[in-house]
Image: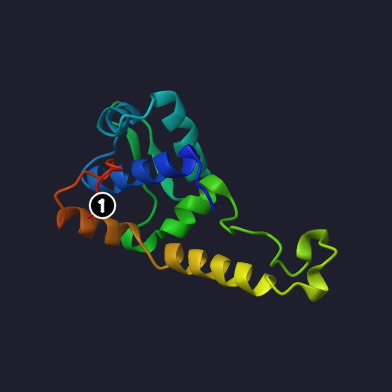
């Protein structure tokens, strides 16, 4: 499975919201400045997160965006599925086998199922609160792809 920029940037954006929207709503321009993501692309991403019920928009002069739930209630899996759809690396493990002619005799199906299950288990048990906590215990910036904590 390879995530698109929508998934990568969306996760960064919602982590930014989790960090900075506790006191007041956060504007797209502030997220854009902190994360280095274009405002237009952020609007598209936040719209998907809003549609999924993960983000709320607040109107008015001091409006912006905030999380719809607490960080400990939003899993990374929810965020990525809202932006990317299904997270399975291979789709042939579905019950309907997606029309695969070898489904009834496929030995490798077990491999793909375990990989899919592992990916889903990993992202479904990781919450925004976990990421925020690891960010406070780490000297790297969330955007950095060169360093890992």
Residue at the farthest right position: 101
Residue furthest front in the image: 107
Residue that mark 1 sits on: 148
Name which quarter of the figure residue 30 lies in: top left
Q: Is residue 1 visible?
A: yes
Q: Is residue 66 visible?
A: no
Instruction: Measuring from the top left, give residue 89's x and y in whole percent.
Output: 59, 57
The image quarter in which residue 146 lies: top left
Looking at the rendered structure, the secondary structure element under dot 1 is loop
Q: Residue at x 34, y 34 (%)?
A: 64
Of 135 and 43, which appears nearest the observer?
A: 135
The vertical placement of 121 against 64, above or below, is below
Q: Position of residue 13 (x, y in %)?
A: 36, 41
Q: Nearer the viewer, residue 140 or 108?
A: 108
Residue at 29%, 40% (x, y): give it: 143
Question: In the image shown, does 11 or 108 lie closer to the viewer?
Answer: 108
Q: Is residue 3 left or right of residue 136?
A: right
Residue 45 in the image, given as x and y percentages of width and height: 47, 37
Residue nearest the viewer, comparing 149 with 43 = 149
Above/below status of 66 relative to 133: above
At horizontal 68% and vertical 71% (from top left) the residue drawn is 108
Q: Position of residue 88 (x, y in %)?
A: 59, 59
């Amino acid at each position: 499975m390879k995530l698109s920029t929508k998934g990568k940037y969306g996760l960064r954006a919602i982590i930014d919201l989790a960090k900075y929207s506790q006191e007041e709503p956060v504007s797209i321009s502030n997220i854009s400045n902190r994360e280095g993501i274009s405002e237009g692309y952020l609007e598209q991403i936040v719209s998907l997160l809003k549609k999924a019920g993960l983000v709320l928009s607040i109107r008015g002069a001091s409006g912006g965006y905030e999380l719809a739930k607490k960080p400990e209630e939003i899993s990374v899996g929810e965020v990525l599925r809202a932006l990317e759809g299904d997270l399975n690396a291979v789709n042939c493990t579905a019950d309907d086998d997606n029309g695969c002619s070898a489904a009834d005799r496929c030995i490798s199906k077990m491999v793909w199922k375990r990989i899919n299950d592992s990916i889903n288990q990993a992202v479904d048990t990781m919450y925004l609160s976990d990421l925020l906590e690891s960010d406070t215990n780490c000297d790297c910036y969330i955007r950095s792809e060169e360093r890992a904590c």
